[in-house]
Image (cartoon, helix red, strand yellow):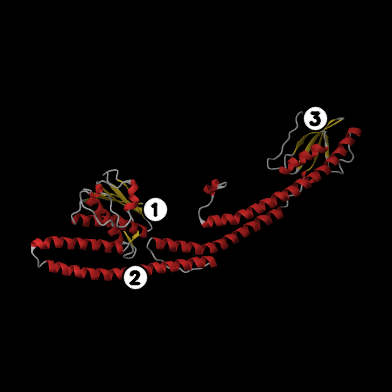
């Protein structure tokens, strides 16, 4: 694109871009008006005044060349004196743009001029060559320059600033509903429900009402799914319990294989229900992630898993769903000890994000298969399952759903220390 290079210099926020759209035309209009005014008023009027002054200077110089004096110099308020020095300074202030027009016009009308000195805004000194030798002509600067219209410039500046402030206030009021909608949507993406009422322009209200409808539908769906799963859990556990009781009456030879199958069915049912419960279980609360991970690792170690704590960096509290985070980390640790010999759990808490990392010394996951591994009910090849048996394929899916429910993500990589899989739950603050 032609203007692609401008993107890096453009504001990224909606407020900044809207302010730029608002301020840029005002500033451009004032600059254009100012340039046109200066060109029309200063330059053209200065040229006319300088041309008239050049005629008066020419008259005085001609009289001096004829008679050695000029009777018109005094009535015309022009000082005339013979030049007796060796050098004549030519000074002009750097910001005196009208002075350049004066000098150019005087030289064009009087070829006899050798030098022009404008030391200040009150006096002009001209060195001119005559038949009787060089002379110095002095006159008031105001006779060749248009007076600065300070009142007009002050009015332009004052009303320009006033209208800009009024526009900023109006713009802020118009963008405030959009920012509230963005905060509500961002909080809902992190699993938090905050109060929101659509306000502002018609289009913003429509977007706000659409967001509320979407949020209500999602909440109803989650609630209905939770109620359904509670019933399914109760209905399925009851026959499994009866089967266990019935198997206890059989001989050991027939009972042990059937009990193993029933236990496997119970484990699969627990994992299916854990996945179906989703990542929205419990309410977000302020908790210390370091203390939470310590507690999870201790519970896993008591359950017989070979797991240890790694680096624990940072301190503070983060809004988390404790039950969901616990389920996600326990699933990652379970995967790590299932496919490897041990797991290491570390935490890094900064001002911008929380990262919970689980590493193992197993075979890992190939980069091209990592995205597929996070899909529900996905099982990898035998290379990863050769020593500890295969799971249902929901561990990584549950961890990914929990991370997304907190507005974060699950990233898979290779452990630099252990050589196996590295799973990071990253949640923005």
Give yes or no for contact between labels 2 and 1 (Cβ–Cβ under 8 Å). Answer: no
Task: Please tell me whether mark 1 or mark 3 is closer to you in this view.
Answer: 1
Distance, label 2 to label 3, CA atoms, is 107 Å
Where, by quadrant of the figure, is residue 292 drawn?
bottom left
User: Dot 2 corresponds to which residue?
Assistant: 224
Marks 3 and 2: in contact by CB < 8 Å?
Answer: no
* Screen quadrant of the C terminus: bottom left
User: Along the polypeptide, which appears first: circle 1 or circle 3?
Assistant: 3
Q: Position of residue 362 (x, y in %)?
A: 24, 47
Residue tagged by mark 3?
Answer: 84
Total marks in image:
3
Above or below residue 249? Residue 24 is above
Could you say which quadrant of the image residue 134 lies in?
Answer: top right
Q: Residues within 10 Å of mark 1 (few under 14, many from 20)?
A: few
Mark toward the viewer: 2 or 3: 2
Which numbered disc flags the more N-terminal residue, 2 or 3? Answer: 3
Q: CA distance from mark 1 to mark 3?
A: 78 Å
Q: Residue furthest right?
A: 67
Q: Are marks 1 and 3 in contact (CB under 8 Å)?
A: no
Q: Nearer the viewer, residue 341 or 146?
A: 341
Secondary structure state at the residue bearing disc 1: loop
**Residue 387, relative to residue 193: is it above or below?**
above
Number of the label disc, if any, that sits on residue 352: 1
Circle nearer the N terminus (2, 1): 2
Q: Report, in whole angstroms, how far the alpha carbon at label 2 lies from the one at label 1.
A: 35 Å
Q: Nearer the viewer, mark 2 or mark 1?
A: 2
Label 2 Cα crowd, 10 Å radius (few <14 / some 14-19 / many 20+): few
Task: Please state the horizontal and vertical placement of residue 389, each as a whole percent of the image.
Answer: 21, 52
Q: Nearer the viewer, residue 293 or 88?
A: 293
Closer-to-camera residue (257/375): 257
Residue shown at the point (72%, 41%) measured from the top left: 120
Q: With 93 as the anchor, is 329 left or right in this view?
A: left
């Amino acid at each position: 694109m032609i203007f692609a290079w401008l993107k890096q210099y453009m504001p990224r926020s909606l407020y900044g871009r809207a302010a730029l759209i608002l301020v840029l035309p005002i500033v451009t209009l004032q600059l254009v008006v100012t340039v046109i005014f200066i060109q029309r008023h200063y330059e053209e009027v200065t040229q006319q005044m300088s041309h008239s002054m050049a005629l008066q200077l020419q008259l005085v110089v001609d009289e001096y060349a004829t008679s050695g004096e000029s009777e018109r110099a005094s009535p015309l308020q022009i000082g005339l004196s013979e030049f007796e020095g060796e050098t004549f300074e030519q000074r002009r202030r750097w910001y005196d743009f009208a002075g350049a027009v004066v000098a150019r016009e005087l030289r064009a009308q009087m070829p006899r001029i050798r030098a022009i000195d404008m030391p200040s805004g009150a006096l002009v000194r001209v060195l001119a060559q005559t038949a009787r030798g060089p002379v110095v002509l002095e006159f008031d600067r105001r006779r060749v320059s248009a007076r600065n219209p300070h009142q007009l410039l002050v009015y332009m500046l004052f009303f320009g600033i006033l209208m800009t402030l009024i526009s900023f206030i109006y713009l802020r009021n118009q963008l405030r509903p959009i920012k509230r909608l963005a905060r509500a949507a961002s909080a809902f993406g992190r699993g938090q429900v905050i109060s929101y009422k659509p306000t502002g322009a018609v289009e913003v209200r429509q977007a706000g009402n659409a967001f509320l409808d979407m949020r209500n539908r999602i909440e109803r769906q989650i609630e209905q799914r939770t109620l359904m799963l509670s019933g399914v859990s109760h209905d399925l556990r009851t026959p499994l319990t009866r089967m266990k009781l019935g198997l206890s009456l059989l001989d050991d030879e027939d009972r042990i294989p059937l009990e193993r199958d029933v236990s496997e069915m119970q484990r699969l049912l627990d994992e299916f229900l854990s996945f179906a419960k989703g990542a929205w279980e419990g309410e977000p609360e302020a908790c210390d992630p370091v203390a939470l991970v310590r507690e999870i690792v201790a519970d896993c170690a008591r359950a017989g898993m070979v797991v240890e704590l790694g680096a624990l960096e940072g301190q503070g509290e983060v809004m988390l769903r404790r039950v969901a985070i616990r389920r996600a980390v326990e699933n990652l640790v379970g995967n790590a000890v299932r496919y490897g010999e041990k797991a290491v759990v570390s935490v890094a808490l900064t001002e911008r994000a929380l990262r919970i990392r689980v590493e193992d010394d197993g075979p890992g996951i190939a980069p091209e298969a990592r995205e597929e591994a996070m899909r529900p009910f996905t099982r990898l090849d035998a290379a990863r399952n050769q020593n500890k048996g295969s799971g249902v394929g929901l561990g990584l899916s549950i961890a990914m759903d929990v991370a997304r429910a907190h507005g974060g993500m699950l990233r898979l990589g290779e452990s630099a220390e252990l050589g196996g899989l590295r799973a990071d739950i990253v949640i923005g603050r």
